[in-house]
Image: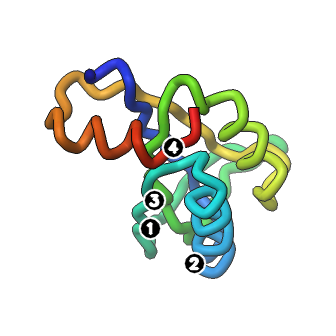
């Protein structure tokens, strides 16, 4: 059942945009859940300079089958030119949670 879940990390410029995007993806059943972690500080290189910014980290739960539609919709909704969209496969997942994610996402 572990191979049926993707954990997707994505940063946003503020809580409002992260909440709006997360709500849209959960309402459309492309994600089962999203956790928003405010007050993340990011240090990154952009256009040749090192930048720092306060961001919000969103942690989405979806499925590999929904991934193409999830990623496309996330890109549409995201305000950044190059959004951080990183999908990870968890090594271990409680079976009941994996089942809930699968039932909550349109395959």
Q: Secondary structure at mark 4?
A: loop
| Residue position for label 3 | 34
Would you name the residue on which mark 1 appears?
Answer: 36
82 left or right of 8 in image: right
Residue assigned mark 2: 15
- Dot 1 lies on which element? strand
Q: Is residue 35 left or right of residue 67?
A: left
Give the vertical position of 102 relative to 91 (above or below): below
Q: Nearer the viewer, mark 1 or mark 3?
A: 3
Mark 1 neighbour class, 10 Å CA radius: few under 14, some 14 to 19, many 20 or more:
some
Q: Which residue is mark 4?
A: 105
Callout 2: helix, strand or loop? helix
Calculate the distance from the C-alpha at mark 2 to the C-alpha at mark 4. Answer: 23 Å
Q: Nearer the viewer, mark 4 or mark 1?
A: 4
Number of the front mark, 2 or 4: 4
Cβ atoms under marks 1 and 3 closer than 8 Å: yes
- Measuring from the top left, give residue 13's x and y in whole percent: 66, 69
């Amino acid at each position: 059942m572990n191979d049926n879940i993707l954990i997707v990390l994505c940063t946003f410029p503020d809580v409002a945009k992260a909440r709006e995007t997360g709500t849209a993806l959960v309402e459309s059943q492309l994600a089962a859940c999203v956790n928003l972690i405010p007050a993340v500080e990011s240090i990154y290189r952009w256009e040749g300079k090192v930048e720092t910014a306060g961001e919000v980290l969103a942690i989405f739960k979806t499925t590999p089958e929904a991934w193409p539609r999830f990623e496309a919709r996330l890109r549409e909704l995201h305000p950044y030119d190059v959004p951080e969209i990183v999908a990870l496969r968890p090594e271990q997942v409680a079976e009941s949670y994996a089942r809930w994610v699968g039932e909550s996402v349109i395959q």
